[in-house]
Image (tube, grey):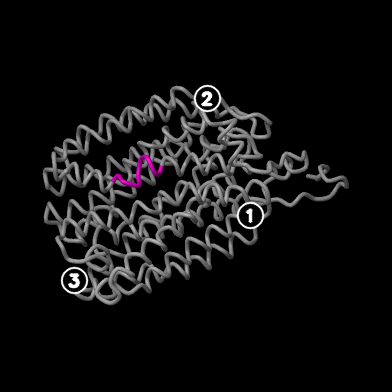
Amino acid sequence: MTDTTFGAAAPAPANTTGRIVVASLIGTAIEFYDFYVYGTAAALVLGPVFFPSESETAQLLLSFATFAIAFIARPVGSALLGHFGDRIGRKATLVASLLLMGISTTLIGFLPGYATIGWVAPALLCLLRFGQGLGLGGEWGGAALLAVENAPAGKRGWFGMFPQLGAPIGFLAANGLFLLLALGLDDAHFRSWGWRVPFLLSAALVIVGLYVRLKLVETPVFREAMARQERVRVPIGEVLTRYGRVTLLGTLAMVSCYALFYITTVFALGFGTKSLGYSRQAFLGLECIAIVFLGIGIPISSRLSDRFGRRPVLIIGGILTALFGFALAPLLGSGSVVLVTLFLCLGLFLMGLIFGPMGAFLPELFPTRVRYTGASLTYNLAGILGASLAPYIAQTLATEGGLGWVGGYITVAAVISVIAVWLINETSREDLTRVSGHN
């Protein structure tokens, strides 16, 4: 293979398939580990550590409110890191996003609590949570582009699966570590220092991720676009003015995916330990079992999306998710170990079905010159609508109206996503080197 885009014939730098897989997978695994470490801690311990002891419910709600801050920061990170990803390159931006997320997560592990420094503690917690969101805002889009822009013809869905698999791997690592801590420490030691360990370990994981990503070269699709002088001065401006419709529809298409994941994990963990009487270690163990089904759903739907198209897979997954909403109350509310486990496994499997194709679907909506910004912004705006307040809203709905309302929340989100996907043309056969975007 020779590179003729820059004049002289010379060997074009290329990423091996193994390097693409590892770099796109390990980065998002670390990022989701960092992000879910916070979600787990928010459900279990951050309320009592960082907020005054007015009531246990108030502490939990305030803790979930800080959880939402990162989702507000993520579109900002999409615009900021996407700007450099589209103008300078995918590689440098992926390194920056990983550093920002990892440093923020590690520093949370060193924060003193409310009893030590008062309201300064939650203020600093919110600041670092914002930093986590900025980092993740640029992480997923870059990892998805790394995989999809290097994919062979007809396999973009399969290659786009690898950053998606970072979610169950990061989730399992975070939950598994919290489970080990819960088994090895009593409640006093866990609240005193044990919860900090997963945050501090993020530093070591980031070093591994940086080692892999620094060995990358730019994707061939991006190099070709730059050779054609397609660089845009302000990518976010073009995304919003020229591709506003597809950005909105792509955002709504992701809403149910986010809502399903965070209600099935973060909300369910808080509800299971506070209302159903499960111990931390027992419920974390159930979630570790269930997350395997997320890992199973992702490759199934990704492979099917290459064969039949993104739209059919996403629409069927959305319809099944809407029906699942009606099963939430009888399954989770039963308190039965068997039925609660079934609820978690079904919910996360369905999340995998609609999450898998998104690694290719969202990047395919935009041309190369704004693809990093567009895919990242769409993905993270969906986080605000579908996930940022999902645990908070679900907890409020459960408290005021019962679990049936929480199930209704999932059903409504799924219907919205199905309609959005229906309004977008099929993307699986699109040429990624095209100049114009999708419609």
Q: Is residue 357 magenta?
A: no
User: Is disc 3 surrounded by few (<14), some (14 to 19) or many (20+) residues within 10 Å?
Assistant: some
Whether 236 is drawn above or below 99: the answer is above
Residue under pointer 2: 426
Tell me the SS state at disc 2: loop
Give residue 255's position: percent from left, percent from top. 38, 37
Q: Considering only order in the chain, which callout, 1 or 2, is on the residue closer to the N terminus?
A: 1
The three-letter amino acid code for the residue at tag 1 is Lys
Look at the image and tell me in which quarter the N terminus lies: top right
Label 3, label 2: how far apart the Cα atoms are: 52 Å
Left or right of 271 on screen, residue 365 = right
Q: Which mark is residue 91?
A: 1
Residue 134 rendering spot, x and y as whole percentages: 48, 55
Q: Secondary structure at mark 1?
A: helix
> Distance of mark 1 from mark 3, alpha carbons?
43 Å
Instruction: Tell me the CA gap for discs 2 and 1.
Output: 29 Å
- Residue drawn at x 41%, y 60% as measured from the top left: 34
Q: Residue at x 65, y 38 (%)?
A: 368
Residue at image coords 42%, 65%:
105
Provide the secondary structure element on which disc 3 rests.
helix
As shown in the figure, which amino acid type bears the numbered disc 2? Glu
Q: Is residue 439 left or right of residue 49?
A: right
Q: Residues within 10 Å of mark 1 (few under 14, many from 20)?
A: some
Q: Give the residue type that dot 3 points to.
A: Asp
Counting from the top left corner in percent of width and height, residue 325 is at 24, 34
Q: Which residue is mark 3?
A: 187
Would you identify the image quadrant in which residue 54 lies? bottom left
Region in magenta: 383-390
| Quadrant of the image occupied by residue 282 | bottom left
